[in-house]
Image (cartoon, rainbow, N blue to C red):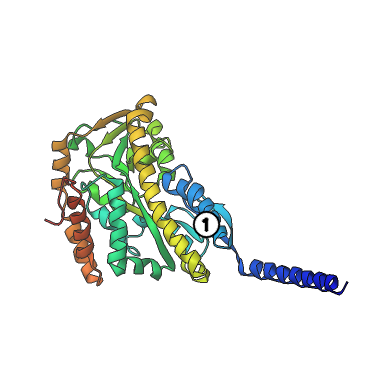
C-alpha cells in the first residue's frame, strides 16, 4: 500500500513538473505582432513575394524556433504612398516592407547607382547579386539604411525599362517634344532626346496617361500588365535602357533590435531568399509579358534598333561621372560603387551598350 501511495505521489509531482515546464516553455515562446506593408499592391512581384513568401514562411520558421509571429498586412498604399516608403518603415508604420530606393536619391544616394548608368544590363538576377555584394562589401550602403532606422534584409531589382506610349517610337527623333512619366532619377535618361520627364510611380501612370498629363511612361516591363498601361498607351518599345536596383526589403530597426538573435538571423535569411525569388519572378513575368500577354492583349510590341540605342546612350551626358563627383563631395564612395557594378556586369559576360566607368 505504501509503495502505491508513493507511486501516486511521484506521479503527481511529475505532472506538476511537466505543467511547470510547459508554462515556462510558453513564456519563452514570445509573441511578436508585426505589420507587413507596401505602397504598391501585390500584383507586382516585389510585393507579392512579401505576401505569399515572407509572411507565411516567417510564421512557419519562427514556430519551429519556438516563437509566434502574428502579421497585419497593409499593401497598396494603405499606410503610405510611393514617395514615403522609406519613412513608412523607418517611422514604424510598417515593421517589414518594400522600400523604393529609386525615390530617395538624397537619403539613399549609393542605392541609386544604376539610375545614373542606363544601357548596362537587363539581367535581373545579376543585378540582385551585385546589389547584395555591394551591401556586404561597402559598409556605407547598409549604413544608409541604419541611418534611416531600418535594417537591410535583401535586394530588389527590376527588369528592363521600356517605353509605353500613345504613338509609335521607331527612332530617337520620335521622342522629341514628348512627356513621359520617369520615376526618380530616371528622368535624366531623357537628357538630349528633347523629351520631358515627369516624376511618378506605377499606381498613377494609367490615369495620368489617359488624361493627357503625359504621352506615356518609362516603366519596367513587369509593371505594364498589372497596371493595364498598355490600354492607355498601346505602343510598347524596348529601347535598351536595362534594369537595376529599385528597392530593398527592410525591417524597422527598433523592431529588429527587439527580436532574439535567432529571429534576427531568420529574417536576414528570408531577405536573401526574397531577393532571389523576386528576381526569378520578375524575369519570368517579363518574358511572359513580351512574348505572350501583351501581344495577345493587342499591344504593339517593338524594339528600337540597336544603332538608335547606341545613339541615345552616346548622347547622354556623363551621368555616372557627375554622380561620382557628387558622392565625393558628400564623403561617399560613389566611384567604388560604380566600378563594382560595372566590373561585376562585365565579369558575368554582359556587354553594356555604354561602359560608364571607361
Residue in the image at 50% along x and 55% along y: 80
The quarter holding residue 102 reads bottom left
Question: Which residue is label 1 attached to?
Answer: 61
Q: Is residue 288 visible?
A: yes
Residue 79, above or below 17: above
In this rendering, position of residue 166 left or right of residue 346: right
Q: Quadrant of the C terminus?
A: bottom left
Q: Nearer the viewer, residue 52 or 29?
A: 29
Residue 36, above or below 204: below
In this rendering, position of residue 251 left or right of residue 168: right
Residue 285, above or below 62: above
Q: Assign a secondary structure to mark 1.
A: helix
Q: Looking at the picture, how far across and down is residue 202, in whole percent?
A: 40, 44
The quarter holding residue 229 reads top left
Residue 254, above or below 83: below
**Mark 1: few/some/many CA within 10 Å (<14, 14-19, 20+):** some
Residue in the image at 23% along x and 62% along y: 337
Amino acid at each position: 500500500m505504501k509503495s502505491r501511495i508513493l507511486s501516486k505521489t511521484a506521479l503527481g509531482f511529475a505532472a506538476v513538473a511537466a505543467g511547470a515546464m510547459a508554462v515556462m516553455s510558453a513564456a519563452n515562446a514570445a509573441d511578436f505582432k508585426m505589420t507587413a506593408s507596401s505602397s504598391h499592391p501585390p500584383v507586382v512581384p516585389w510585393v507579392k513575394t512579401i505576401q505569399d513568401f515572407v509572411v507565411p514562411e516567417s510564421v512557419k520558421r519562427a514556430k519551429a524556433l519556438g516563437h509566434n509571429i502574428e502579421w497585419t498586412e497593409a499593401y497598396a498604399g494603405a499606410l503610405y504612398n510611393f514617395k514615403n516608403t522609406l519613412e513608412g518603415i523607418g517611422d514604424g508604420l510598417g515593421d517589414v516592407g518594400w522600400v523604393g530606393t529609386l525615390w530617395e536619391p538624397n537619403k539613399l544616394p549609393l542605392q541609386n547607382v544604376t539610375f545614373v548608368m542606363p544601357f548596362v544590363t537587363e539581367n535581373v538576377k545579376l543585378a540582385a547579386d551585385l546589389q547584395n555584394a555591394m551591401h556586404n562589401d561597402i559598409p556605407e550602403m547598409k549604413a544608409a539604411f541604419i541611418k534611416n532606422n531600418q535594417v537591410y534584409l535583401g535586394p530588389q531589382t527590376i527588369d528592363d525599362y521600356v517605353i509605353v506610349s500613345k504613338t509609335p517610337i521607331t527612332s530617337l527623333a520620335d521622342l522629341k517634344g514628348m512627356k513621359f512619366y520617369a520615376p526618380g532619377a530616371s528622368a535624366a535618361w531623357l537628357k538630349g532626346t528633347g523629351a520631358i520627364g515627369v516624376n511618378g510611380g506605377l499606381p498613377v501612370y494609367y490615369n495620368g496617361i489617359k488624361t493627357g498629363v503625359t504621352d506615356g511612361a518609362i516603366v519596367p516591363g513587369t509593371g505594364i500588365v498589372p497596371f493595364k498601361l498598355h490600354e492607355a498607351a498601346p505602343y510598347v518599345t524596348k529601347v535598351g535602357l536595362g534594369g537595376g536596383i529599385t528597392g530593398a526589403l527592410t525591417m524597422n530597426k527598433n523592431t529588429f533590435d527587439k527580436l532574439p538573435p535567432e529571429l534576427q538571423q531568420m529574417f536576414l535569411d528570408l531577405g536573401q531568399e526574397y531577393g532571389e525569388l523576386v528576381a526569378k519572378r520578375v524575369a519570368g513575368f517579363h518574358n511572359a509579358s513580351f512574348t505572350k500577354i501583351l501581344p495577345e492583349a493587342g499591344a504593339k510590341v517593338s524594339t528600337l534598333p540597336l544603332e538608335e540605342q547606341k545613339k541615345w546612350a552616346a548622347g547622354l551626358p556623363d551621368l555616372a561621372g557627375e554622380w561620382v563627383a557628387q558622392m565625393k563631395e558628400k564623403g561617399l564612395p560613389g566611384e567604388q560603387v560604380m566600378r563594382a557594378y560595372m566590373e561585376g556586369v562585365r565579369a558575368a559576360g554582359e556587354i553594356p551598350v555604354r561602359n560608364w566607368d571607361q
